[in-house]
């Protein structure tokens, strides 16, 4: 059939295809802006149509320029890293200040580090512009105010509305309902902050250095707190893109799966934030890439140990499980003088020692911090742990029930923010993109063997159960029948390994193609994942800056 069609329909030259693609992208962008005008009443809110369509054209032309620049890079890994940084930059500015989980505490700590303060003093105060930023963007905008009822249009007609899921906040029981736009207006109103801000209850240092460096550069350039926050996000994103480049360079197979996870909107959302989760995700992906190497050499051991220790510094104890990864690697890939058990033992000792060292550091250099009670009433580690040990079958049902209620978190990859802002389209499409990437990876020749496959699957499942159990013990009231505080972002590294396993299994079912097919599959995976990542940023921007205003106008 292909030969018959090619006889009558010749493939257009590449410039013509590029022009057609650009026209299609411009048409899609203009249609999206028209959707905003109609659905969100932008005309009634005084936004000129020409400005909207002009912004759409600039966005598409910038994307086309990025694609052209990426095409000049020879390495697929470099192209992917560029796409990660550019798509992540959209999230930097689409996401309002201090809306990522714990971003306020992380920003404050990073700001202190940028001032050369490596001790922790609760009585130490920040500059007025930092206090103004924290006051203007108090966080947890999503789901903090929900109501429904009737309102009236300018023509006097009734219109029903609901604020469920919108980025709105109500300060106090009878306070004014505010949007993100009100937060920016408050920050730039020229008035000093009403309250001073001291150092947070957060005592990490080494994992915060990339964002602290970004803040330092911004401060040297004379930027105020808001500029420092965006600089910190970009610095974290740059570090994440660099780690992803290393991980992809390390991979010899399954690159489409890694690329899809690295460009997943939820991954980019965390990477483009003032949070240690940005580099933590990068180190997770780097460690996972060792499963996809043909040979493990002496120099690889140093990289693995460094990434493993940084993971455990940011997320202690639960990250120790990843020392199992070298143990499940095929023996044929092990070309180093270091024995597997020696590497595992060294990682275990190093991870525990480093964790204890920084625990001591955070306690020994902490001053003037008052006692703070638990955030969750009724939570207690020892009674909860004893309850699990006394009735493990009951806890197993709690664990499975919590995962079932949350779509096993694979259906929640479109949840953002501290209080679960959901973008349903992202939740629906994310698993499809990941399965598509796994299918593209059948072009990779698999070295899968039964025992390594079993070990990889077991590691992923045990990691997920361990992360959930940690939240049950530390942050859930004793005896509760569901686990509080679980989020899909916690399971991204485990999901990555499970999809690598899916790709490996598919490569045994479907016949892999030659090297040309591998290169084409990687390009397709990068293109689809980059477009999906950029669309995720646009939809996040829509929620915060376009959608909710008409509801409360």
Image: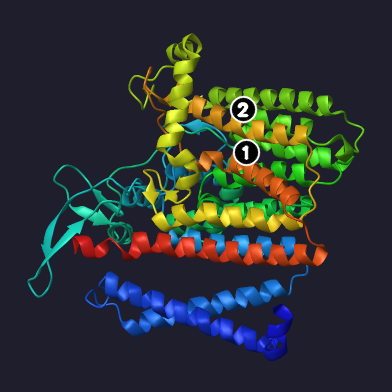
For the N terminus, the image quarter is bottom right
For the C terminus, the image quarter is bottom left
Quadrant assignment, res 394: top left
Q: Nearer the viewer, residue 413 or 89?
A: 413
In the rendered structure, find residue 206 and report the number of the disc placed on it.
1
| Residue at image location 48% in from the left, 65% down from the top | 535
Q: How many marks?
A: 2
In the rendered structure, find residue 448 and report the number of the disc placed on it.
none
Dot 1 lies on which element? helix
Spot occupied by residue 232 in the image (x, y as percentages of width and height): 53, 53
Dot 2 lies on which element? helix
Q: Is residue 471 above or below residue 488?
A: above
Mark 1 vs 2, N-terminal side:
1
Q: Is residue 174 above or below residue 323?
A: below
Kindly tell me whether residue 61 is visible in this rendering: yes
Q: Alpha-carbon neighbours of circle 1 within 10 Å: few (<14), some, or many (≥20)?
A: some
Left or right: residue 518 versus residue 106 is: right
Q: Residue furthest left?
A: 156
Which residue corresponds to mark 2? 358
Q: Nearer the viewer, residue 272 or 495?
A: 495
Spot occupied by residue 365 in the image (x, y as percentages of width and height): 55, 26
Disc 1 to disc 2: CB gap under 8 Å = yes
């Amino acid at each position: 059939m292909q030969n018959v069609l090619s006889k009558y329909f010749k493939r257009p030259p590449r410039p013509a295809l590029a022009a057609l693609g650009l026209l299609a992208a411009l048409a899609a962008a203009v249609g999206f802006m028209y959707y905003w005008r109609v659905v969100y009443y932008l005309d009634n809110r005084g936004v000129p149509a020409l400005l909207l369509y002009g912004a759409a054209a600039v966005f598409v032309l910038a994307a086309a320029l990025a694609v052209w620049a990426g095409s000049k890079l020879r390495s697929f890994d470099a192209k992917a890293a560029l796409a990660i940084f550019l798509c992540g930059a959209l999230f930097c500015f689409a996401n309002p200040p201090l809306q990522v989980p714990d971003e306020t505490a992380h920003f404050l700590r990073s700001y202190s580090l940028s001032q050369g303060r490596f001790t922790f003093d609760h009585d130490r105060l920040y500059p007025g512009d930092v206090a103004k930023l924290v006051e203007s963007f108090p966080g947890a905008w999503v789901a903090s105010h929900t109501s429904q009822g009737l309102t009236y249009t300018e023509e006097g007609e009734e219109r029903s509305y609901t604020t469920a899921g919108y980025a709105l906040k109500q300060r106090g029981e009878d306070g004014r309902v505010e949007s993100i736009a009100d937060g920016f207006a408050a920050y730039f109103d020229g008035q000093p902050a009403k309250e001073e801000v001291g150092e947070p209850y957060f005592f990490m240092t080494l994992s915060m250095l990339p964002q602290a460096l970004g803040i330092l550069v911004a401060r040297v350039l004379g930027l105020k707190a808001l500029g420092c926050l965006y600089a910190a996000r970009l610095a974290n994103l740059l570090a994440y893109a660099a780690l992803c480049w290393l991980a992809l360079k390390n991979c010899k197979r399954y690159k489409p799966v890694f690329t899809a996870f690295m460009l997943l909107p939820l991954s980019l959302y965390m990477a483009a934030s003032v949070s240690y989760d940005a580099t933590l995700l990068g180190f997770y992906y780097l460690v996972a890439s060792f499963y996809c190497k043909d040979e493990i050499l002496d120099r690889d051991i140093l990289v693995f140990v460094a990434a493993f220790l940084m993971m455990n510094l940011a997320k202690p104890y639960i990250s120790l499980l990843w020392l199992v990864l070298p143990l499940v690697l095929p023996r044929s890939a092990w070309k180093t003088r270091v024995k597997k058990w020696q590497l595992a033992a060294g990682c275990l000792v190093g991870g525990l020692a480093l964790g204890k060292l920084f625990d001591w550091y955070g306690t020994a250099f902490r001053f003037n911090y008052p006692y703070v009670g638990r955030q969750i009433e009724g939570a207690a580690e020892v009674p909860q742990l004893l309850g699990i040990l006394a009735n493990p079958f009951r806890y197993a049902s709690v664990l499975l029930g919590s995962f079932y209620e949350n779509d096993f978190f694979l259906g929640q990859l479109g949840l953002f923010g501290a209080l679960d802002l959901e973008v349903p389209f992202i939740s629906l499409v994310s698993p499809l993109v990941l399965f598509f990437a796994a299918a593209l990876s059948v072009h990779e020749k698999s070295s899968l063997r039964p025992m390594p496959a079993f070990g990889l699957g077991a590691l992923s499942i045990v990691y997920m159960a361990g992360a959930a159990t940690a939240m049950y013990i530390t942050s859930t009231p004793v005896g509760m029948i569901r686990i509080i505080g679980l989020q899909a972002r916690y399971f991204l590294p485990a999901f990555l390994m499970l999809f690598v396993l899916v790709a490996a299994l598919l490569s045994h079912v479907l016949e892999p193609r030659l090297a040309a097919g591998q290169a084409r599959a990687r390009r397709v995976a990068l293109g689809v994942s980059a477009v999906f990542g950029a669309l995720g940023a646009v939809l996040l921007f829509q929620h915060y800056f376009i959608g909710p205003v008409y509801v409360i106008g």
